[in-house]
Image (cartoon, grey):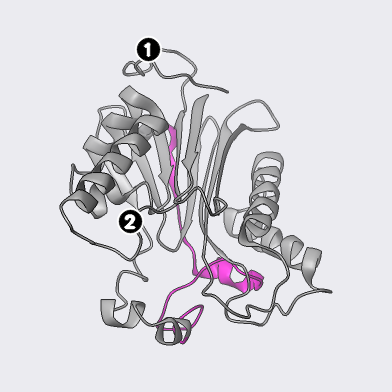
């Protein structure tokens, strides 16, 4: 396993609410990737004394521990247990029933010598690269189905948040794990994988600078930080042109990249960026 993680805050005045990690499996065979994109609450009462980065760090740590150390536990159960643990950590001080209680999107991927499991909840993306170079994007598109005019209204969006017919995020209810997009792919069909928060997937989804396969090519050659650098350049260029294509010029952006094989020449070079794992 060879991996790299990069994350950039959307603004130097605000803490980064994303969280990402890659870790080897406790048994020494395989590994796990975890990615969270914390949901920025609107100004005002949210029922919780903790900031979003506290929540994503707690949830992300629990997800990494459970997915790496409990290979017999399905990923939906991993997510449910991690949500339960995190909720228990602030149940006594916070109103966890509040619609804007701290929450996050989730990407989980775990592999051993036989299979690659995945779980995606809300609008972060998981990319799976086959040995031949084909790239498959695993997406939860329920938030994308919400009309733009609804998404521009906090009240209207909240009426669809974690509701049937709307979209789902990891907050305080473990039952949301059953709403996640999950699946399994034979290990031989996956050479590498990547997880992107929507601040990083802007390269494809907002700016159309390339498709998912081309995005994966950037990750392979330049590493996650190279992709994030490209996104920031596109955002700055768009601003200079006077365009405002989304609510925020810059969003927190995080990318996690992992090569599942152990060799440097496992189907292609990785350029000059540093890797860990």
Q: Which residue is mark 1?
A: 265
Mark 1 or mark 2, whichever is nearer to me: 2
Q: Is residue 91 visible?
A: yes
Label 2 crowd bin: few (<14), some (14–19), many (20+), radius 10 Å = some
- In the image, residue 40 sits, relative to residue 182, either above or below, namely below
Label 1 crowd bin: few (<14), some (14–19), many (20+), radius 10 Å = few
- In the image, residue 114 sits, relative to residue 74, either above or below, namely above
Q: Residue at x 38, y 54 (%)?
A: 198
Q: Residue at x 46, y 22 (%)?
A: 261
Q: Which residue is mark 2?
A: 249
Q: Residue at x 38, y 62 (%)?
A: 140
Residue 252, position as x, y percentages in the image: 45, 51
Q: For this view, does 70 lie left or right of residue 175?
A: right
Report the span colored magenta.
Answer: 159-187
Q: Is residue 207 visible?
A: no
Q: For this view, does 115 lie left or right of residue 100?
A: left
Residue 10, position as x, y percentages in the image: 44, 51
- In the image, residue 118 sits, relative to residue 260, either above or below, namely below
Which mark, residue 155? none
Q: For this view, does 72 lie left or right of residue 238?
A: right
For this rendering, which residue is in front, 229 or 131? 229
Secondary-structure class at tag 1? loop
Residue 159, position as x, y percentages in the image: 46, 87
For this rendering, which residue is in front, 28 or 45? 45
User: Residue 39 lies in magenta, yes or no?
Assistant: no
Q: Report the quarter where the C terminus lies.
A: top right
Residue 163, position as x, y percentages in the image: 49, 83
């Amino acid at each position: 396993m060879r991996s790299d993680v990069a994350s950039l805050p959307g603004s130097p005045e605000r803490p980064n609410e994303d969280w990402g990690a890659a870790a080897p499996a406790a048994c020494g065979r395989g590994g796990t990737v975890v990615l969270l994109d914390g949901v920025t609450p609107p100004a005002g009462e949210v029922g919780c004394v903790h900031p979003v980065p506290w929540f994503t760090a707690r949830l992300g740590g629990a997800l990494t521990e459970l997915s790496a150390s409990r290979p017999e536990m399905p990923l939906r159960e991993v997510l449910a247990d991690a949500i339960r643990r995190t909720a228990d950590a602030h149940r006594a001080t916070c109103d966890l029933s509040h619609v804007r209680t701290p929450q996050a999107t989730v990407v989980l991927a775990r592999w051993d010598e036989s299979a690659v499991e995945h779980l995606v909840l809300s609008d972060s993306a998981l990319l799976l690269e086959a040995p031949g170079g084909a790239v498959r994007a695993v997406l939860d598109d329920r938030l994308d189905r919400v009309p733009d005019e609804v998404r521009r209204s906090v009240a209207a969006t909240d009426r669809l948040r974690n509701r049937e017919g709307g979209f789902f995020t990891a907050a305080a209810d473990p039952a949301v794990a059953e709403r996640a997009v999950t699946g399994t792919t034979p290990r031989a069909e996956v050479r590498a994988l990547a997880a992107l928060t929507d601040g990083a997937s802007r390269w494809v989804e907002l700016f159309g600078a390339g498709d998912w396969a081309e995005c994966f090519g950037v990750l392979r050659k330049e590493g996650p930080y190279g992709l994030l650098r490209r996104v920031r350049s596109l955002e700055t260029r768009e601003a200079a042109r006077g365009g405002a294509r989304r609510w925020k010029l810059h969003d927190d952006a995080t990318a996690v990249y992992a090569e599942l094989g152990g060799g440097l020449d496992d189907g292609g070079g990785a350029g000059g960026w540093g890797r860990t794992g």
